[in-house]
């Protein structure tokens, strides 16, 4: 059992929705007493994608002010990884895939084995494949030998898939995560902390 877990929250976001969910994870885990390292992933297409969604401008500064994750080695010392992706064509986005693939050497040494994992995703609509994006995140964790924490039915707030927390941002990507998602993230994080520390949530 861990006394005070060190948690990495890593995300990719252009329009701000996955960033806002990641912020909710950061705040929830910090409130629960964990140490949180908070990172964004590099996106070489940030400007092009951002131009397609005017709503993205509202979060550009907030996203780019988050520390850039230069190397996967930065998360190796953490006890848990929570990884967030926008759904791109029913899958994770390219920056998230590149991040996952960058663990190839660490996979050989099983450096993430036994650590805790949770994925979160945003998508335009509930029919747009966020579940599959979450499954892709979970598959990565399973290849790494990590302990994936699914979302139990007791989690409160907005209704969530078992595979991780999801938010649906609408056609213009400007419907932001609200109180329901904040409660779901807080409730899920309390569940995760109880598992990691052996304390009741
Ligand atoms: C290249 C691209 C592909 C997308 N594919 C999907 C998709 O398959 N299903 C869906 O529901 N939304 C899709 N979207 C919408 C995004 O998943 C959605 O706007 C998401 O909330 C963006 O996350 P962000 O606000 O963190 O950037 C796509 C957006 C882009 C730019």
Image (cartoon, rainbow, N blue to C red):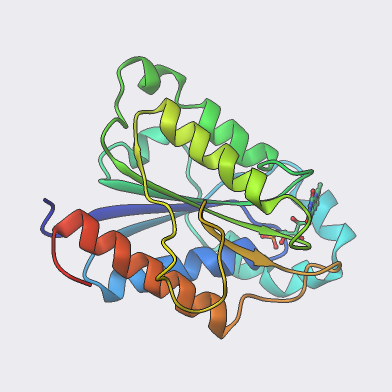
* Quadrant hosting residue 62: bottom right
Question: How far from the left and from the top, in percent, is residue 79?
Answer: 25, 46
Q: Is residue 163 left or right of residue 93?
A: left
Residue situated in front as seen by the camera: 21 or 136:
136
Farthest bottom residue? 179
Q: Residue at x 37, y 50 (%)?
A: 149
Q: Is residue 7 left or right of residue 91?
A: left
Residue situated in front as seen by the camera: 176 or 158:
158
Q: Is residue 140 left or right of residue 42?
A: left
Residue 19 vertical placement versus 109 (above, below): below
Question: How far from the left and from the top, in percent, is residue 95?
Answer: 64, 40
Residue 196 vertical placement versus 133 (above, below): below
* Quadrant hosting residue 198: bottom left
Farthest front residue? 153
Q: Residue at x 64, y 45 (%)?
A: 133
State whether residue 1 appears in this view: yes
Question: How far from the left and from the top, in percent, is residue 35?
Answer: 25, 61
Q: Residue at x 51, y 33 (%)?
A: 139
């Amino acid at each position: 059992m861990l006394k005070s877990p060190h948690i990495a929250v890593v995300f990719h976001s252009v329009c701000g929705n996955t960033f806002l969910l990641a912020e909710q994870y950061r705040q929830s885990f910090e409130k629960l007493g964990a140490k949180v390292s908070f990172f964004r992933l590099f996106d070489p297409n940030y400007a092009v994608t951002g131009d397609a969604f005017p709503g993205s401008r509202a979060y550009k500064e907030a996203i780019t002010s988050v520390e850039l994750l230069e190397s996967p080695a930065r998360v190796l010392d953490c006890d848990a990884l929570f990884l967030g992706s926008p759904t791109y064509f029913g899958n994770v986005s390219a920056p998230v895939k590149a991040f996952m693939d960058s663990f190839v050497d660490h996979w050989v040494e099983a450096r993430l084995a036994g650590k805790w994992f949770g994925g979160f995703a945003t998508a335009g609509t509930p029919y747009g494949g966020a579940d599959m994006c979450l499954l892709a995140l979970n598959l990565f964790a399973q290849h790494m030998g990590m302990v994936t924490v699914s979302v139990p039915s007791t989690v409160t707030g907005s209704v969530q898939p078992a595979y991780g927390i999801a938010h649906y941002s609408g056609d213009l990507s400007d419907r932001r995560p609200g109180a329901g998602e904040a409660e779901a993230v807080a409730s899920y994080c309390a569940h995760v902390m109880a598992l990691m520390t052996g304390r009741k949530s």
